[in-house]
Image (tube, coloured by chain):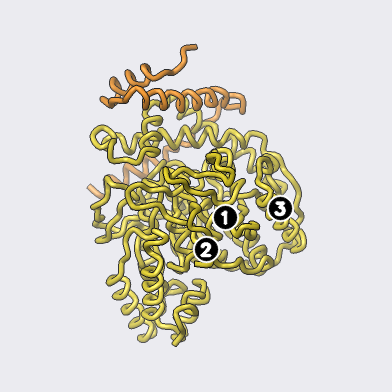
Chain colours: A yellow, B orange
Amino acid sequence: MANQAELLSFDVATLGEKIRTREISPVEVTDAYLERIDEFRERLLAYITVNREDARTAARNAEAELMAGDWRGPFHGVPIALKDLCYTRGVLTTGGSKILADFVPDFDCTVWARLREAGAVLLGKLNLHEFASGATNTNPHWGTCRNPYNLERIPGGSSGGSGAAIASRTAAATIGTDTGGSIRIPAAFCGCVGMKPTWSRVSRYGVLPLADSLDHTGPITRTVRDAALMLQVIAGHDPHDSTSSTEPVPDYAANLNGDLTGVRIGIIAELLTGLSDEVALSFNAALRELRILGAAVEEVKIANIGTCSTIATNIMFAEAAEYHEQWMRTRAHEYGHDVRRMLEAGMITPAVYYVRAQRSRAAILAETLKALERFTVLVAPTAAIPAPRIDVGGRALLDSGAPVDMVASVLRFTAPFNVTGQPSLALPTGLSPNGLPLSMQIIGKPFDEATVFKVADAYERARGSIPEPKL
Amino acid sequence: MARLNGPTVKALALELFDYKFSDDDAASVAHIVGAMANYSRRLHAIGLAGLQPPFGYATMRAEAARIRRNS
C-alpha cells in the first residue's frame, strides 16, 4: 500500500491508470486527500465544504465497480473538488456568499453530473471570491484563502480555492470559472495549469453566473494532460444550456507528443509592457524554450487589445447587476464591500455603453483571428506580477506596499480572451527569486483547445517540474 | 457635457431601482462609472460601424424550446 505522500504525488493521468490496474484503491487515495484537507484546512481556507462521508461512499462504490471489471475512464475513483459556484445536489453551494450561506441545490450542474458519471469522487466545494466578483479571493464571509507558496499572498481569484487546492495537493483536479481571468489568475499565482476553454464549449447549466456572456467553466489541474483529460469529460453540447456549442469534441489528449515542428507562435506585443522583472525574465526564458522545441516565435500586434478591460468591465458590471438586482434591493448589506460596489456601478452603467461593449467584441475577435492567420497560437504573460500580498483590510499590495492596480497588472492580460471567447490556457514558467509561481498563457483559435494543449504540453515537458510549496 | 456626480447617482438609483445610496457611496460609484463612461465613449474609434452584437436568434429559439420542454 502506498503512503500518503506517494498517493498525493500522482497527477490524474497517473492516478487514474494506477486505479484502473488496481495498484491503488479509490478508498485509500480518497482517505489520503481527506487527511491532507484536514491538515491544512484552517491554514489555507481553500475549502468551504468538505464532503467527507459522501466522498468515502463514492470511493467505495468506485472500488466495487472496478473489482467487478467496470472502469469508467481516467477519472474513475479520482478525488476532485469544485468551485463553490457549481451546483451539487444535496451539498451546500454558497457562491462564497452570505446570501447563499444555507443554499442546498436539488440538482447537479452539468459539469459535476458529467464528472460524477465518469466516476470522480467529490471531496468538497472550494472557496472563491464572493459570487466570483473579484481577482484577489479575499472573502469576508468564508475567510480569505491563502496561497500555498506563501501564506501572506493571495491565491488569485476568483477560483482561488481551486488553485490553492491543486498547489497544496488537497485535490487531484478542480473546476473553476473564468469571466475576466478567474481560472487563469489563480492558476498563475498558485503554479497550476488553468484552461479557460472557448465560450460555450462547456455547459454553464447549474453554475452561478457572474456575467453570462463572459462566463466560462474549466479545469484547474497539475498538468496540461490532466486539464485535457478533464475537459474531455465536461465539454460538449448540453440541452440544458442553450448557449452550449454543438461543435464536435475532439480527443484532446491525442496529439500530446511534444512535437512543435511547424508551429508558429505569436507573442502579443501590447502585453509585453508593464511587466515586473521576474515575470519578464521567466516569460523570455519560456519563449527560448519554445524556440528550442522547434517553434517559430515572433511578435504580433493586436492594436485594440487594450480596450478589452473597458469592454469586459462594462459587460460584467451590467450583467452582474441585473442578476443580483433582487437581492440588492433588500439584502445589499450582506454583500462584501467590493462586490456591492461593483453591483452598484453596474446599476448605473448605461445600456448604451453595454451594447457598445458587446458590439466591440467582434472587432477584437477579428483582430486576434487575423493574427492567427499567420500563427498557430498566441502567447502572453498571464499577469504582470507574481502573487501580491494581502493586507489586513483584504487589499492586494505590491512588495513596496503600494496597492495593486488589478486592471493594469492582471485583468489587462486575461480579459481579452473572455471578450473574444477564445481558449486560453495558463501554465507555470517557473518561480520568482522569492519562490512565487510565474505563468504564461497560450491562446488558440475558437474550439481549437487541442492545439493549445499540444503546445502547452510540449513546453511543460521541456520545462520540467516546478518546485512544490513548502507547507 | 454634464459630469456624473454623487447626487445624480443617488437620484438615478432611487428612481430606477428604489435603491438608497449614502453620499459617500454615491460619490464613489459616480467616480467609477464616470471613468468607465470616458473609456466607453472612445470605443467608436476601433470601428464599430455595422457590427452586430453577439445576440444570436438561435439562442433565443433554443431557450424557448428549453422552456417549453420543461413546462
Evaluate if marks 1 and 2 touch, with contact meaning CB atoms under 8 Å apart: yes
Q: CA distance from mark 3 to mark 1?
A: 20 Å
The residue type indicated by label 3 comes to: Leu
SS for dot 3: helix
Which residue has dot 2 on it?
A227
Q: Is residue B20 above or below residue A444?
A: above
- Crowding near pointer 1: few (<14 within 10 Å), some, many (20+)? many
Q: Chain of mark 2?
A: A
Q: Earlier in the sequence, mark 3 or mark 1?
A: 3
- Which residue bears the numbered disc 3? A281
| Image spot of residue A396 (x, y percent) | 50, 44
Looking at the rendered structure, the kind of residue marked 1 is Leu
Does any portion of residue A445 appear in the rendered image?
no
Can I make out residue B54 in this image? yes
Residue receiving disc 1: A425
Which image quarter: residue A315?
Answer: top left
Q: Nearer the viewer, residue A399 or A120?
A: A399
